[in-house]
Amino acid sequence: MEDRWQECMDFAVSIARKAGSVVCAALKEDVSIMVKSSPADLVTATDQKVEEMIISSIKEKYPSHSFIGEESVAAGAGSTLTDNPTWIIDPIDGTTNFVHRFPFVAVSIGFAVHKQVEFGVVYSCVEDKMYTGRKGKGSFCNGQKLQVSGQKDITKSMIITELGSNRNPEVIKTVLSNMERLLCIPIHGIRAVGTAAVNMCLVATGGADAYYEMGLHCWDMAAASVIVTEAGGTILDATGGPFDLMSCRIISASSREIAERIAKELQIIPLERDDGKSTN
């Protein structure tokens, strides 16, 4: 069975690279933009085309597997995670970046069995960086082994977060207040790259010491979550409890100390879970 998942991972890498080339080609053309949940939550024809291409290729090879894809869910498909081998796909993580041609755009493919992520592939296609992580086997970028910074002192840390696409004034107030609380600890700085998957991969490389966000989805987090843990990092829920792929929130950090310290400062934004179950 081990080898079977390795074969799936190799296939995920090849399909991510193909999808990335479609995304990069589309960056040179006019982008047709549609709006989803808010004027800042965007989707393009390329998102839909790339997801369809990824899912149909995988279905052909693994017809018994399940899928959770960002655009399929947006079109009404469910996002229930079962024990069945499940591919969790974000065809373009960083759609707003893509629309504006801001050069951080990723194809993210996670693979879960018995509700646990077995491997993740994140292809930052403009940079041509292929991040991979497999449970128990380490994580890599273009073949080079990754290791988190190991920083434990939050006052020496650089943290990544995002402002998100929710434009509700109360939510924005909480997002900014959380940043203010962290800056006043004080920390070295806060950055925003515009893609959850790349943000987490930057933690895995040691380039940032932590990343947190609320209002994400499982397809934003699945692939990169295993890349972070396999690079020696820690992943928690934004409350400081155990990470839950369906909770729409995450803290990923170079150490448990920093993750827990961030959790202490965060005011939690109420969110609907991806699986529709009640949140705590």
Image (cartoon, rainbow, N blue to C red):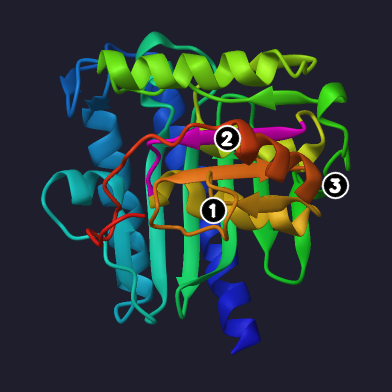
Question: Within the magenta stretch, is there residue 216?
Answer: yes
Q: Circle 2: is it few (<14), some (14-19), or many (20+) Cα within 10 Å?
A: many
Q: Which residue is mark 1?
A: 223
Question: For the residues marked 1 and 3, what is the alpha-carbon distance in whole angstroms?
Answer: 17 Å
Rendered location of residue 250, percent (x, y): 53, 44
User: Which span of residues is magenta-colored?
Assistant: 209-217
Rendered location of residue 179, percent (x, y): 57, 18
Q: In this view of the protein, which residue sits in the foreground, 90 or 165?
A: 165
Instruction: Indicate whether 165 appears above or below 93.
Output: above
Q: Circle 1: is it few (<14), some (14-19), or many (20+) Cα within 10 Å?
A: many
Instruction: Of the two numbered discs 1 and 3 on the same chain, state the one appearing first in sequence.
Output: 3
Image side of residue 191 versus residue 215, left or right: right
- In the image, what residue type sits under mark 3? Gln
Question: Within the magenta stretch, is there residue 5?
Answer: no
Image side of residue 110 versus residue 148, left or right: left
Name the residue located 54 percent from the left edge and 16 percent from the top edge: 103
Instruction: Indicate whether 7 appears above or below 168.
Output: below
- In the image, what residue type sits under mark 2? Tyr
Q: Circle 3: is it few (<14), some (14-19), or many (20+) Cα within 10 Å?
A: many
Looking at the rendering, which quadrant does residue 3 occupy? Answer: bottom right
Question: For the residues marked 2 and 3, what is the alpha-carbon distance in whole angstroms?
Answer: 19 Å
- In the image, what residue type sits under mark 1? Ala
Instruction: Of the two numbered discs 1 and 2 on the same chain, state the one appearing first in sequence.
Output: 2
Is residue 192 visible in the rendered structure shown here? no
Instruction: Indicate whether 61 appears above or below 226.
Output: below
Q: Which mark is residue 212?
A: 2
Q: Which residue is mark 3?
A: 147
